[in-house]
Image (spheres, rainbow, N blue to C red):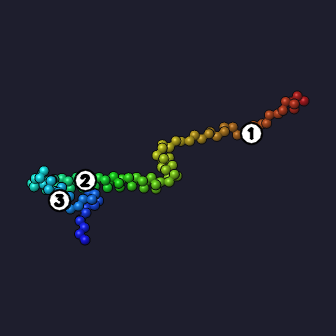
């Protein structure tokens, strides 16, 4: 059994003859002198894209872990600590120390 070599994944189902045909067309269009610089430019672009996507993925994972690690009480505590503190006003102590006399009923005063 002779099965053709298949490059699956990013390129789909490209067999070796299709890849050779594409390489020949690229060689005809760009010429043999510009192929190394073209390959380098494509490699740098792919590397930058991979680095940026991994940084983006890490940032999303870090923000998700940070949100999940804070419980409701911890979030409230952090919010209260961030707000400016307000002083509470205490009522003044009473000035007179003499006990008040109970009022007498009007019926007792008339006798």
Please, what secondary structure does the residue beneath circle 2 have?
helix
Q: Which numbered disc, 2 or 3, marks the residue closer to the eye? A: 3
Q: Which numbered disc, 1 or 2, marks the residue closer to the eye? A: 2
Contact between labelled residues 3 and 2, with CB atoms less than 8 Å apart: no
Give the residue displayed 66% in from the left and 37% down from the top.
95
Residue 34 visible in the displayed image:
no
* Residue assigned mark 3: 20
In the image, residue 42 lies at what x, y percent? 20, 53
> Compared with residue 111, is residue 99 higher up or lower down, i.e. above or below?
below
Residue 9 visible in the displayed image:
yes
46 and 101: which is toward the camera: 46
Q: Is residue 89 left or right of residue 35?
A: right
Contact between labelled residues 1 and 3, with CB atoms less than 8 Å apart: no
Q: Is residue 44 left or right of residue 95?
A: left
Please, what secondary structure does the residue beneath circle 1 have?
loop
Instruction: Tell me how far mark 2 sits from mark 3, CA to CA.
Output: 27 Å
Give the number of callouts.
3
89 and 30: which is toward the camera: 30
Give the residue displayed 10% in from the left and 55% down from the top.
32
Q: Earlier in the sequence, mark 1 or mark 2?
A: 2
* Residue assigned mark 1: 99
Q: Residues within 10 Å of mark 2 (few under 14, many from 20)?
A: few
* Residue assigned mark 2: 48
Give the residue displayed 73% in from the left and 38% down from the top.
98
Residue 97 lies in what quarter of the image? Answer: top right
Residue with the most extreme top position? 110
Q: Earlier in the sequence, mark 3 or mark 1?
A: 3
Q: Residues within 10 Å of mark 1 (few under 14, many from 20)?
A: few
> Which quadrant would the N terminus be assigned to in this image?
bottom left
Q: Is residue 73 left or right of residue 17?
A: right
Instruction: Tell me how far mark 3 sits from mark 1, CA to CA.
Output: 109 Å
């Amino acid at each position: 059994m002779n099965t053709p070599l298949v490059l699956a994944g990013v390129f789909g189902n490209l067999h070796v003859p299709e890849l050779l045909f594409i390489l020949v067309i690229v060689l005809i269009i760009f010429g043999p002198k510009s192929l190394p610089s073209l390959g380098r430019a494509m490699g740098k672009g792919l590397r930058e894209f991979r680095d940026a996507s991994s940084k983006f993925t890490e940032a999303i994972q870090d923000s998700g872990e940070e949100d999940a690690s804070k419980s409701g009480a911890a979030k409230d505590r952090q919010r209260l600590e961030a707000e400016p503190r307000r002083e509470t006003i205490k009522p003044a102590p009473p000035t007179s120390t003499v006990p008040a006399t109970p009022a007498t009923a009007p019926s007792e005063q008339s006798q």
